[in-house]
Every structure is written in structure tokens, then in C-alpha cells.
Image (cartoon, rainbow, N blue to C red):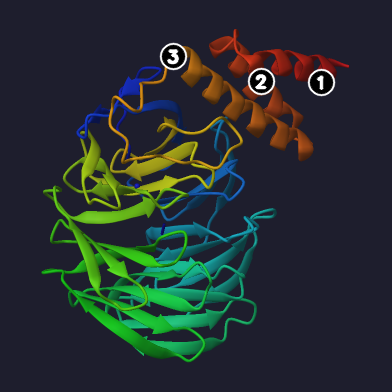
Amino acid sequence: MSLPFSLRFALCCSLLFTCLAGRAARAEEIRQLKGHVGVVYSVSISPDCRFAVSGGADKTVRYWDLLTGREIRRFTGHKGRVNTVMFSRDGKQIVSAGFDGTARLWDVATGRELKRFTGHRDKVTWVDISPNGKLVASSSDDRTVCVWQSASGKELHRFSASCNGVRFSPDGKSLAGAGLDKLVYLWDVEAGKELWQGTGHTKDVIGVTFSPDGKQLMSTGVDTSLLLWEVKTGKMARRFSGHTGWVIEGDFSPDGKLFFSASMDKSIRLWNVESGKELERQNYKSGMHAVAFSADGFYGAGAGQENVVRVFELSLGRQPHGAKPKVDLKASPEEKPQKSKEELDEERAASRLRVARLHLQSKEKKAARDILDELLSKYPKTKAADEARELLEKLKN
């Protein structure tokens, strides 16, 4: 809705986040996706972690190669700012929400507009697509939330609720809403009925995001707080405090243990979901609108008031490349020694190699070659570099 989210990293190869919990985590900005004219309000990373999509004040939706930084395609048609963009779960479609009062469904491969949803009478503030791709949900300043059939554009349900954001649950059975009336909503999608309303925010709620297992829901709001909810009961489980400005949105890590939040207080923060403690903070020059984790936990992207999308690699105590991301936040610094530069380089090189192989599978040889060349330039002594040299030799033949 996800991040998601600008990330103002120092203009150097890497930086060390300051860890407020006594543990350090490294992040490296690897790309800036430049092209938008004006604020970038939303960013999403494709399920295969190869691409990103962004939407902004310039009324465009842009599709990027995540690691080469190349703009692949531009989706035009919205007559107002694009407030939200989201990939479908298979990565083949994109949904967008515009202040022109429409939500739109796009084909990634061709850039063609597949469907336009025009039932709202005011700005469309958020949009999401169900996990199976059959439904689209949208929220609007007309004080309604709509659920549509993605193929036909037919309206299935209309809920009377003034919401800024909506999100489908991972199983697609529920829909959450971020209420401008200080409430968090949950609806049964099939039955079209409200399941519960959550009270706890003292001002407008801006965003909602489900945990990967669908058991919890995080809401963000104007009151500068993040609230964690138990989806089954509607009870608030935890309040996260620390931001000093509106918290626009956030995203869970793939294992659900971490949460990134983007705020107008010019910071992005990383939280321990179980304890509610702030782990890391990075301050920027401008407000943050969106942030997102990649599905494998190796990449992040963020956007905001600096007109660019920043792409970065994360090293958060992960397992060896290829293993399911896992962070043991209960361990003390003594139990979790800081990774060496060599270990981090191996991770980052292996991550680039994986993406290069995906490009080769799609017969995108130039993109693969660019990534492999960069890998050899930055990480020549890694194991992945040996494989990269072999792949480059094959590309020459």
C-alpha cells in the first residue's frame, strides 16, 4: 500500500543506520529512479523483485527496472495526481488511484489501460488489487469504499465510510480501511458486511497494512502513531510512538517481524513489531510519503518530496542468500555479532547475481550485462563475481 515511501540516504556507496536498540543494520543506496516532475506519492516493488512502479504529482505512473534504474514504460491517462500504485500479486498488472476520481488497471507488458473504474464522485485516495487479481478496492473523498470486479469493472460492494486507504488481506477475504473519522475498519469481502471498527487513533487514519500472515493489521495516522491490531478480534495490541509528524504509510518485512514507517516528520523508522520498540531511524530533508520492502527482504524503495525513487539494499542480519529472511530481534548485540564487510559484500553480490539471472531468463541480455558489470566493479572478490564472469563470457559467445 503496502511502501508504501523519499528515502534520503547520503550520497555515498553505503551508510550505517544508527540503531537505537543497540544493534546496527547496514543499507546501501544503489539507484535513484529519476524522471518524475514533482512529488512521488507511492512506490511498489514487483513480486519477483526486479521492477518498481511509482506514481506522482505529474499525473504519471512509471515502470522501472529496479537495479539498472531504467524507465521501461510510462502509463499516462490520469488527469490529476496519482496517489497510489500497486502491483498485482503475479506482477502482470498495476492498479493506480488518481485525484481525477478514477482508479485504473494497467497491463504491465504493453502499458495498455485494461479497465477504468469511474463510480466515485470525488478524488480516489487509494487502491488495491486482491491476491487472486479478481477484485479491485478503492477509497475516495466521496466518503465511500468500493469493491469492483477487475475484469468487468462492475461494482460489487459500496461501503459508506470516509477512508483514506484500503488494503486486502493476504487471503483476499477481508478488506481493511483507514478512516478519516479516526476509525479502522474491517469488512468481509464476500458478504459485503462490516466485521469491526477499531478505535484508538485520536485523529484521521491515513494508511493500513496487513502482516504477511494476515493475523495483524498496522494503521498509521495524523496523530503521529502506529497502531497494531489483532485481525480476528479487532482489539488493539500495541501502540508505536516516536514520530512527530503524520505517518503516511508503512510496510511489513516478509517475515512480519519488522515494520517500516514513512512520515512527514522527515524520517523513516524501523520498528520491532513484537515489542513496539523503534530500532532505527534515518532523517531526511523532506517529508516521506512511501516506503516498501521487496518480497525477498533484500531490497527497499522509498519516495517523497524530492521527486525521485530511491532504491537500496538491506542487510538486517539475514540468513545466507536464498534462505528465507529471518531476523532474531530478541538476541542481544553480544549474541548477534556485527557482520563483516566481506560478508555483506557477499550478500549484495549474490543478490545482484540473482536478479541478473532473472533478466537472462526473460531474454533481457542488456539489463543482465549491466548488472553483471556493476557486480564485478563493486564486488570483484566475491564468489558471485566468479559466476558473473562465466555468465558474461557466455553472453559474448
Mark 1: secondary structure: helix
Mark 3: secondary structure: helix
The residue sitting at the right extreme is: 397
Cα distance in 3D space between marks 1 and 3: 30 Å
x and y percentages locating residue 208 in the rendered image = 33, 65
Count neighbours of disc 3 (C-alpha within 10 A) and say few if under 14, some if 14 to 19, many if 20 or more.
Answer: few
Report the disc number at residue 341: 3
Badge 1 vs badge 3, beta-carbon distance below 8 Å: no
Q: Where, by quadrant of the figure, is residue 249 drawn? A: bottom left
Badge 3 vs badge 2, beta-carbon distance below 8 Å: no
- Amino acid type of the residue tagged 1 in the rendering: Leu
- Please give the residue where the numbered disc 2 appears in the rendered image: 372
Badge 1 vs badge 2, beta-carbon distance below 8 Å: yes
Above or below 183: residue 11: above
The earlier-in-sequence mark between 3 and 2 is 3
Residue 269 in view in this figure: yes
- Image point (37%, 49%), residue name: 257
x and y percentages locating residue 173 in the rendered image = 50, 78
x and y percentages locating residue 273 in the rendered image = 30, 52
The earlier-in-sequence mark between 1 and 2 is 2
Residue 120 in view in this figure: no
Cα distance in 3D space between marks 1 and 2: 11 Å
Q: Quadrant of the C terminus?
A: top right
The earlier-in-sequence mark between 1 and 3 is 3
The residue sitting at the top extreme is: 381
Mark 2: secondary structure: helix
Q: In the shown orientation, is residue 275 left or right of residue 396?
A: left
Task: Select label 1 or label 3 by which is in front.
Answer: 3
Q: Quadrant of the N terminus?
A: bottom left
Depth order, front residue of 60/198 = 198
Task: Select label 3 or label 2 by which is in front.
Answer: 3
- Amino acid type of the residue tagged 2 in the rendering: Leu
